[in-house]
Image (tube, grey):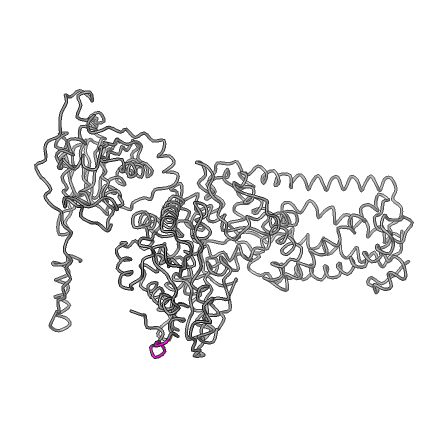
């Protein structure tokens, strides 16, 4: 049946019987032997490269504490992120959709490809128009061939678009410094296009003719050239990333517990776990991580993509049993310690790479062994050990503040333990936030108390990889909470909230904890509101948004006080203030200051007030706004915004800190 | 080099302290302890000398069981082994003054002393709690070794001497050269203190700590010398008191320039903040 249009109506298929690509005709024994030899060669070349990768992954250390169960979340992630391509599309809609169509076409073509090769051996799966009857009936076959043809059209357009993007538009995220754009990805795009074109073309040629045979062989050749190109290029993600997504650690920024006396984090190749190696080989080099990284965007050395590819480079050169230091030839210590742990990279990664356990792992390896020598870092660890707070102040200073604010001491009878944290207990601006939040709590008649003694949660030590200090602080705090019978904690600091709730789990069972934005949002209906209509821009703190999935609660507080304005980068794509990961304590940064970049973005919204929800963001923006000049917007925590609306406050400017 | 570092465990700086019921010392029930600050710098100096010249660093400390934590911290930072003069109780060591304690320290390291030029004994300038500044100097006298105090920098010359930088008063410094072995008491703030690491703590578990009780030190079994007792205290602590809080306000008069000049003078000579 020659010259059947490629995409006839579905109705036509059922009425007219199978519509199919042209049958290439009978294959001689020589043809079959040639085909078999080509398949064996292609598969052998594939395995020669893929076997090495698989071996490196499997020879890596087993992940201590990894559990496959429960499967529910894994299956959901697989359906949503792999099959639906949700992350790929959401982050970059147009190229994402193009990618999704290529991917879906691959799935659709699985059966077509199987049928294609089987036909070469005279064993068709789908029934075509020729003399060979397939295993599957003509009606379904016809439907399927047309469906595949529709995908083939979408895929051809998509891959052509992606080719143009990669080689002509050239977004800078795709590039790697010191590396050429890989020629293989051009070849592969060409092969995919050729596969689609030969498939579509075969609808237009006569059965068993020369053209049909030629198209069949070209299609086959494309498949067999494609296969060995996969393992040593970014296209390895075709095979690995579904597994990577399925085998995630199960939560955002999950830093694994150290196992045994010889585990200090990622020191040498021996410390690379199977998940880390699998993730390193899954990287598709798309650069979404780089695009969102506050360090990479402000001229730092750190580029999260290069961290992952550095691990891959290490594995390729030294392997997973090597004793060569990981922070050496392929990754630099300087870059590893420029990370604010904002998590934008991990959040955006479409192939399931967990950057934070890797970056924090590298830091652990350097800090736990003493290899990281940094004046500020060393000082921070020493004051955390000596003074038990990150600001290095005397505990008496906190006592004075507690007395001055007349904060009740927690004795087990109150509902909430109000956790001050280092910023709330010692930093002047943090104390203002506490004072405002306490006003709101008092207005609501909430029962609360503060601990007589508090130590830092260990957040900066944890993120900078000092497990000794972190463990000491976590254990001491957990013990204090046990003895004081603390059940519920509320804190103004997202870093404290995250560290207490998730990171302390390694050493015990922390009490329930919430951020004050959640507390405020829950009590919104009982609080007085005077909406002044002023424009307030909200900055999502990394540790509240990405780390805790709290986006709407602080917005509710702001929307009740004025007009909520969004910054260009908001919610899960919020841009870091530069303080996280212990960097607030590490002194001057190289390149542009992250805090200045973000502050300018917030100022540019035209808002008259910046609403913050984290004392670290607050302190970073306070300094950044001071550089903006006199017209800088006001900077308030959501607790201050809520407190300003309490009765008797209206005539006072909300900026005024309570005494 | 072989370096012995004498380290004292003291109540944490800025700890909230109360006077005990007898009124002769602070109540230790609620107090956390830490390494004496200038001793931490002495340890850092010793570790840096070891890194530059090789050898071993031996920690020497006296006190009850709680002192073990500070010893482990020193071992975690890189000291090789330790000698712990263990007192039975909080009071046992408190009955001696600086001379008695120095005698115990000197006796505990009798076997360690080598007449080699690359042997040094370091300790902090003074303790954060008693602040006598005597112990290191007396140890040197007891051992018949040269000594220097308030040291900021130690440079072995390689010819049986060590060149040291001493802090004098009023912003003056002095270079001295001493014959080694010698005893040096180290001033705080001369270098950046390293942090203890997880790996260090794990390694410290396997490092030897020799525990000797005060009774053993006094017995004749130990070494060659006969049974002996440390000197009875010459200085006896009568009473301790918390300092009374002083908060006074002074108004400085005159033109802004005069007021500023007066302020600078007061900050410099009365408050000593400049």
x then y, percent, for residue B218? 17, 26
* Number of residue marks: 0
Tell me, yes or no, whether the highlighted magenta stretch contains residue A253: no
Please tell me in which quadrant of the rendered image residue B3 appears: top left
The image quadrant where one finds the N terminus of chain A is bottom right
x then y, percent, for residue B100? 13, 33
- Residue A601 visible from this viewpoint: no
Image vertical order of residue B20 relative to residue B256, above or below: above
x then y, percent, for residue A36? 79, 40
Q: Is residue A2 left or right of residue A73?
A: right
Q: Is residue B55 left or right of residue B138?
A: right
- Toward the viewer: A550 or A645? A645
Q: Which residues are magenta?
A: A647-652
Q: Residue furthest left?
A: B234
The image quadrant where one finds the C terminus of chain A is bottom left
The residue under the point 33% across, 44% down is B195
Q: Is residue A239 left or right of residue A646?
A: right
Please tell me in which quadrant of the rendered image residue B89 appears: top left
- Residue A52 visible from this viewpoint: yes
The residue under the point 73% across, 56% down is A105
x then y, percent, for residue A49? 64, 41
**Predominant SS along the magenta part:** loop
Please tell me in which quadrant of the rendered image residue B176 appears: top left
């Amino acid at each position: 049946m020659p010259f059947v249009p490629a995409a006839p109506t579905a109705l036509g298929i059922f009425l007219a019987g199978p519509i199919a690509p042209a049958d290439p005709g009978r294959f001689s024994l020589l043809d079959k032997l040639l085909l078999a030899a080509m398949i064996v060669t292609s598969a052998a070349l594939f395995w020669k490269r893929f076997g090495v990768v698989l071996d490196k992954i499997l020879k890596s250390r087993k992940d201590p504490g990894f559990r496959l169960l429960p499967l529910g979340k894994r299956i959901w992630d697989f359906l949503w992120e792999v099959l639906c391509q949700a992350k790929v599309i959401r982050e970059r809609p147009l190229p994402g959709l193009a990618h999704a169509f290529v991917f879906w076409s691959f799935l659709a073509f699985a059966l077509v490809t199987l049928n294609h090769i089987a036909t070469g051996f005279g064993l068709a799966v789908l029934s075509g128009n020729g003399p060979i009857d397939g295993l599957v009936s003509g009606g379904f076959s016809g439907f399927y061939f047309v469906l595949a043809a529709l995908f083939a059209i979408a895929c051809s357009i998509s891959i052509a678009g992606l080719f143009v993007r990669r080689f002509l538009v050239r977004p800078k995220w795709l590039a790697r410094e010191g590396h050429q754009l890989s020629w293989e990805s051009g070849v592969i795009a060409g092969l995919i296009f050729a596969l689609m074109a030969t498939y579509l073309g075969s609808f237009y040629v006569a059965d068993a003719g020369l053209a049909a045979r030629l198209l069949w062989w070209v299609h086959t050749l494309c498949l067999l050239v494609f296969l060995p190109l996969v393992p040593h290029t970014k296209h390895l993600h075709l095979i690995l990333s579904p597994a990577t997504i399925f085998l995630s650690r199960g939560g955002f920024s999950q830093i694994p517990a150290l196992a045994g006396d010889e585990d200090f984090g990622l020191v040498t190749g021996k410390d690379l776990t199977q998940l880390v190696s699998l993730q390193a080989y899954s990287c598709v080099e798309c650069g979404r991580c780089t695009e969102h990284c506050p360090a990479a965007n402000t001229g730092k050395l750190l580029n999260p993509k290069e961290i992952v590819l550095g691990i891959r480079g290490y594995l390729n050169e030294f392997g997973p049993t090597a004793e060569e230091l990981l922070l050496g030839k392929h990754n630099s210590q300087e870059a590893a310690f420029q990370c604010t742990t904002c998590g934008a990279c991990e959040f955006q990664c479409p192939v399931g790479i967990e950057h934070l356990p890797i970056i924090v792992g590298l830091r652990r390896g350097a800090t736990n062994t003493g290899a990281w020598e940094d004046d500020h870092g060393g000082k921070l660890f020493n004051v955390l050990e000596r003074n038990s707070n990150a600001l290095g102040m005397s505990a008496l200073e906190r006592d004075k503040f507690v007395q001055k604010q007349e904060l009740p001491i927690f004795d087990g009878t109150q509902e909430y333990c109000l956790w001050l944290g280092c910023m709330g207990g010692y930093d002047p601006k943090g104390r203002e936030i506490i004072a405002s939040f306490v006003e709101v709590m008092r207005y609501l008649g909430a029962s609360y108390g503060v601990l007589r003694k508090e130590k830092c949660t260990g957040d900066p030590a944890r993120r900078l990889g000092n497990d000794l200090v972190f463990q000491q602080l976590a254990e001491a705090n957990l013990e204090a909470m046990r003895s004081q019978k603390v059940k519920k904690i509320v804190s103004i600091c997202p870093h404290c909230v995250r560290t207490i709730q998730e990171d302390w789990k390694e050493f015990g069972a922390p009490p329930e904890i919430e951020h004050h934005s959640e507390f405020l949002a829950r009590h919104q209906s009982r609080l007085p509101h005077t909406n002044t209509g002023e424009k307030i821009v909200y900055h999502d703190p990394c540790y509240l948004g990405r780390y805790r999935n709290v986006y709407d609660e602080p917005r509710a507080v702001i929307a009740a006080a004025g007009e909520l304005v969004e910054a260009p980068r908001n919610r899960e794509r919020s841009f870091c203030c530069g303080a996280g990961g212990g960097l607030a304590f590490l002194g001057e940064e190289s390149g542009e200051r992250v805090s200045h970049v973000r502050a300018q973005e917030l100022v540019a919204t035209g808002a008259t007030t910046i609403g913050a929800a984290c004392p670290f963001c607050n302190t970073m923006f306070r300094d950044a706004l001071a550089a903006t000049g006199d017209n800088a917007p006001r900077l308030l925590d959501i607790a201050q915004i809520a407190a300003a609306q309490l009765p008797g406050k209206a005539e006072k400017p909300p900026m005024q800190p309570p005494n | 080099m072989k370096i012995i570092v004498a380290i004292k465990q003291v109540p944490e700086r800025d700890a909230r302290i109360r006077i005990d019921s007898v009124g002769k010392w602070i109540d230790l029930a609620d107090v956390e302890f830490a390494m004496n600050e200038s001793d931490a710098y002495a340890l850092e100096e010793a570790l840096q000398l070891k890194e530059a010249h090789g050898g071993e660093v031996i920690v020497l400390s006296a006190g009850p069981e709680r002192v073990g934590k500070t010893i482990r911290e020193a071992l975690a930072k890189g000291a090789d082994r330790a000698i712990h003069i263990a007192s039975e109780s909080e009071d046992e060591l408190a009955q001696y003054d600086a001379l008695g304690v120095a005698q115990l320290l000197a006796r505990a390291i009798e076997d360690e002393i080598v007449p080699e030029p690359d042997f040094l004994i370091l300790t902090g300038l003074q303790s954060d709690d008693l602040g006598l500044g005597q112990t290191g100097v007396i140890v040197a006298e007891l051992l018949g070794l040269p000594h220097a105090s308030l040291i900021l920098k130690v440079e072995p010359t390689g010819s049986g001497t060590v060149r040291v930088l001493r802090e004098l008063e009023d912003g003056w410094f002095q270079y001295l050269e001493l014959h080694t072995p010698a005893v040096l008491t180290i001033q705080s703030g001369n270098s950046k203190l390293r942090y203890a690491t997880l790996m260090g703590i794990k390694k410290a578990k396997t490092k030897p700590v020799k525990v000797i009780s005060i009774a053993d030190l006094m017995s004749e079994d130990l070494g060659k010398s006969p049974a002996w007792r440390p000197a009875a205290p010459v200085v006896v602590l009568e009473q301790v008191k918390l300092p009374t809080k002083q908060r006074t306000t002074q108004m400085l008069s005159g033109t802004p320039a005069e007021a500023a000049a007066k302020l600078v003078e007061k900050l410099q000579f009365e408050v000593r903040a400049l």
